[in-house]
Amino acid sequence: MIRKFLLERISWIGFFLILQLLALLIAYVDTNLALNSIYYYTFLSSVLFLIFLFIRYQKETRFYREMNDRAANLDVTTIPDGESPFEKIIETTMVEQMERLKKESSHNQSLLEQEKDDMLAWIHEVKTPLTSMHLIFDRISDQKTRSQLTYEWLRIHLLLDQQLHKKRMPFIENDLYMEEIHLEPLIFSELKTLQSWCIQKGIGFDIDLEVASVLSDSKWLAFMLRQLLTNAVKYSEASEIMVRSFDENGQTSLAVTDSGRGIDARDLPRIFDKGFTSTTAHHDHAATGMGLYLTRKAADSLNMNIEVDSKLGEGTTFTLIFPKRNDFLEIREL
């Protein structure tokens, strides 16, 4: 701060030094003036000037030190009171701008809430005719036609579900309810939704649950599992997908393993990025690049880790790692 203060006052300091040199020059040229007296005056005025600089430094930098140390937020109470006219101008301007930004932020937040509510209401309304359509499919006698229609219905259903959770994601902390969840009924409920698709592709499941229950939020855990199972089915053909739970290093893990096309090593660091699809199958226009992104976001909010192990052409394993039991209270506070 001292260096900045001196740089700010460099013109005044320079002007003072010029005056001192001018006095010495006049004493040197004018023989009627006593040179020793001018030396004494120069020394005394320099000492007084240094004392003056020190006092002004303490007084003038208080406001800016407090401004520099304050948190970067819109809390106007943290803005220090200005003493000099210029400091008061800065204080007044900042307070006015922060108040305006707070009003704009509040307005934008209200618009965002309204948009979210409208979107959620629309999704729920759309689900009603979708449910009716699914019941109508059972009346179709042509098995091939019914399978095709069911598959397209499932795609719409999953996209709507993904959009629903995407809109809820910014407010996930308000939506969490931590409880003991039995994995078997949760997994079978998700598999039942994908049943027609799996039959069509000739895919079966091997369930091995060494750990029967976990502590988590059932709605968001079901969403994450749905994304992993959907990906596994989507990129597999006539094979078996394994779902297993196990304990490792005091933490419960839930792994979904498929033997599908796998993921290229160069894509692995980016698969959880928003909108990223694939470099090996970039022609796949059905992929949105949102499923794994939302899964990672939900896992972070639940204090969970998600790991992936994959080899191109051999298959992929996604593993959800739950927090330790002694971390449950920390999550529950959310």
Image (tube, rainbow, N blue to C red):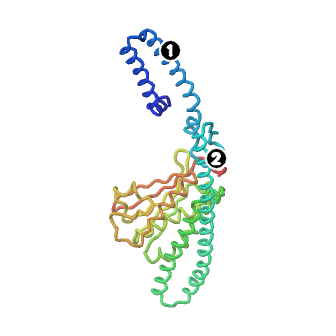
Q: Amino acid at mark 1?
A: Leu
Q: Residues within 10 Å of mark 2 (few under 14, many from 20)?
A: some
Q: Position of residue 272 (x, y in %)?
A: 45, 58
Q: Which mark is residue 76?
A: 2
Q: Name the front one of labels 2 and 1.
A: 1
Image check: 301 left or right of 147? Answer: right
Residue at image coords 50%, 18%: 45
Q: Position of residue 283 (x, y in %)?
A: 34, 71
Tell me where residue 66 sits by quadrant: top right
Q: Which mark is residue 44?
A: 1
Between 232 and 331, the one nearer to me in the picture:
331
Distance of mark 2 from mark 1, alpha carbons? 45 Å
Residue at image coords 40%, 21%: 22
Residue 161, compared with residue 83, is above or below; it is: below
**SS state under label 2:** helix
Q: Amino acid at mark 2?
A: Val
Between 287 and 203, the one nearer to me in the picture:
287
Query: Contact, CB < 8 Å: mark 2 with mark 1?
Result: no
